Image (spheres, coloured by chain):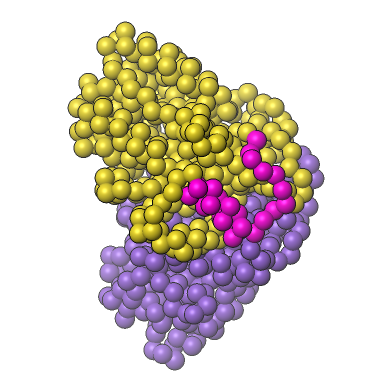
Chain colours: A purple, B yellow
Amino acid sequence: MKKFINHPENVVDDMLRGLLLAHSDQLRSVRSDNRALVRADAPVYGKVAIATGGGSGHLPLFLGYVGKGMLDGVAVGDIFASPSSRQMLDVTRAIHGGKGVLYLYGNYGGDVMNFDTSAELADLDNIRVETVVATDDVASMPKGYEQQRRGVAGLFYLYKLAAAKAETGADLEEVKRIAEKANSRVRTMGVALSPCILPAVGHPTFQLGEGEMEVGMGIHGEPGIQRGSIQTADEVAATIVSAILEDMPIEKGEKVSVLINGLGATPLEELYIVYQAVHNLLADRGIDIDSRYIGEFATSLEMAGLSVSILYLDDELGRLMEAPFVTPFRIQN
Amino acid sequence: MKKFINHPENVVDDMLRGLLLAHSDQLRSVRSDNRALVRADAPVYGKVAIATGGGSGHLPLFLGYVGKGMLDGVAVGDIFASPSSRQMLDVTRAIHGGKGVLYLYGNYGGDVMNFDTSAELADLDNIRVETVVATDDVASMPKGYEQQRRGVAGLFYLYKLAAAKAETGADLEEVKRIAEKANSRVRTMGVALSPCILPAVGHPTFQLGEGEMEVGMGIHGEPGIQRGSIQTADEVAATIVSAILEDMPIEKGEKVSVLINGLGATPLEELYIVYQAVHNLLADRGIDIDSRYIGEFATSLEMAGLSVSILYLDDELGRLMEAPFVTPFRIQN
């Protein structure tokens, strides 16, 4: 296992200390174990607060989206493991600005259980909490079972749109409605070329043969829907775009936002090659790409692979997409 | 070889087409082969123009630094290969706004030869050209031979500072002076954990044993100064910080900017772990980190590894570091 770490058990703690040293002007820890981080200026009064959380190993997810015009706080778990309900509650209390809190995170069992417990505890503090869970991974469950799908890189769009709505001073129901609308209109599919190694485990999360790729793999190495020989970038793009548009038909003349997300080891050069193919496939169908995000937005440590997310815009979402935001990770609009 | 490409020979062309489709509002091609790209609003009259260039495979270097408050144009070579003097000349002509052009790039033989030829050709067009070559890699040549060192991630600081100076309306000599000053005050050292594979070659650029790392390796896999067992993040940071400060002593109470650069496959989590160690090592010596950049700024395809750059600030450079810039790659100040 080749990693720049000190001890496998200390990876998350060391990472969090580095992060807080680097970005103390923008992020603040509200627990001595640093597992609950909030905007330096939290709570922001008169604004619906948005909390997220999840396992570590996916930077910039989840931490990287806390900032002005984005999220208010995050609970930080161990590598690929849910944070505790107590950590989530500490985030909730620190960010609540009097207008309630929206929980916004990916659909994984541990996270759902702990966020639900945290919401019950927050209720005892008279903090209103609503929850929207991202379920954008089309490959994780077939059509008709959308609510059981995993949440992956498309969560970025839920963050961005709900946060933009919250910035307008909208109430909790309205911010929740936007997050739900975004979730209903975003689809993601990923392809893995290689596994990653969890520091505390020391061996790869799965095996892929030389020359093999797996279509539909999750960001923790969850099995995909098809394993086979490596395809060209054009073929990979065609597979993904077809799967997404079959699941969520988009008419000619409509607008989308596209996110080409690197899972860790895949060079930016390759993401642009795939973007070219996605652009051309959508153009062939008369679909207009209104905005695009190309880079690493939700990773799986050093996994080689990528995902493509398509957000089906309407006028309301299109306007919210233009809102500015800034995070310590220099991810900006 | 596991890559999202169509054909090994078309990697750069496909990448450039994707990039231009994605960022046509900010970047413009001035050659039918797309190997010369400039700011969409080039030339900017009344401002010294800055051109760079080099081989592909290092994104966001070099392309990613063309934008407002940053560079004016870039010549794009094949993977790890210099662009031609003709491509550089086309960039030069397209960006010249009447105040001359600064060539700013890394110290590699092919690039130097071709940029020098381009400067001679530009002179025939009555375009004044000055050149500053980045030589920040301390591991590439010993002290006393600084001018023969390779240019690596520290080039980012030369770009940023020279561009900020150019934005003030300074003349060519002044912009050149700032680039030279930045180069004289920045040092970088890298460590590689794994090689990368050039698409047209198909096998790794070098071999590193299981459990081995190489200190001082260049961003094309040039040999380093020491190969040995993998060290902890703290040990790696100590090796690098010692080497840099031995080469460029910095007194207690002085200020620096630090760049922790991922070479491709290394997760952001690990970069923050190394940042923590670098921060503590500098704090122990009473050196203050005034700004920091943590992420991928100069990569080597999917190489696992990182580099640390330290820029020794003075008042003049400190002020220029604060200037805003924006690039299509969402790398911002």
- Residue A68 position, x and y percent, is 34, 63
- Residue A139 position, x and y percent, is 65, 55
User: In the rendered image of this protein, does residue A296 appear above or below residue A175?
Assistant: above
Q: Which residues are magenta?
A: B223-246
Number of numbered discs overlaid on the protein picture = 0
Q: Nearer the viewer, residue B9 or A277?
A: B9
- Residue A1 position, x and y percent, is 73, 56
Going by the picture, which residue comes out furthest to the bottom? A124
Seen at 57% across and 39% down, the residue is B139
Going by the picture, which residue comes out furthest to the top? B124
- Residue A299 position, x and y percent, is 58, 55
In the image, residue B224 lies in the stretch drawn in magenta? yes
User: In the rendered image of this protein, does residue B232 appear above or below residue A31?
Assistant: above
Q: Is residue B321 left or right of residue B99?
A: right
Residue A258 in sight in this render:
no
In the image, residue B196 lies in the stretch drawn in magenta? no
User: In the rendered image of this protein, does residue B54 appear above or below residue A63?
Assistant: above
Residue A222 in sight in this render:
yes
Q: Nearer the viewer, residue A278 or B304?
A: B304
Q: Nearer the viewer, residue A248 or A135?
A: A135
Seen at 29% across and 10% down, the residue is B125
User: In the rendered image of this protein, does residue A72 appear above or below residue A256?
Assistant: below
Q: Nearer the viewer, residue A298 or A234?
A: A298
Seen at 29% across and 27% down, the residue is B49
Seen at 56% across and 24% down, the residue is B81
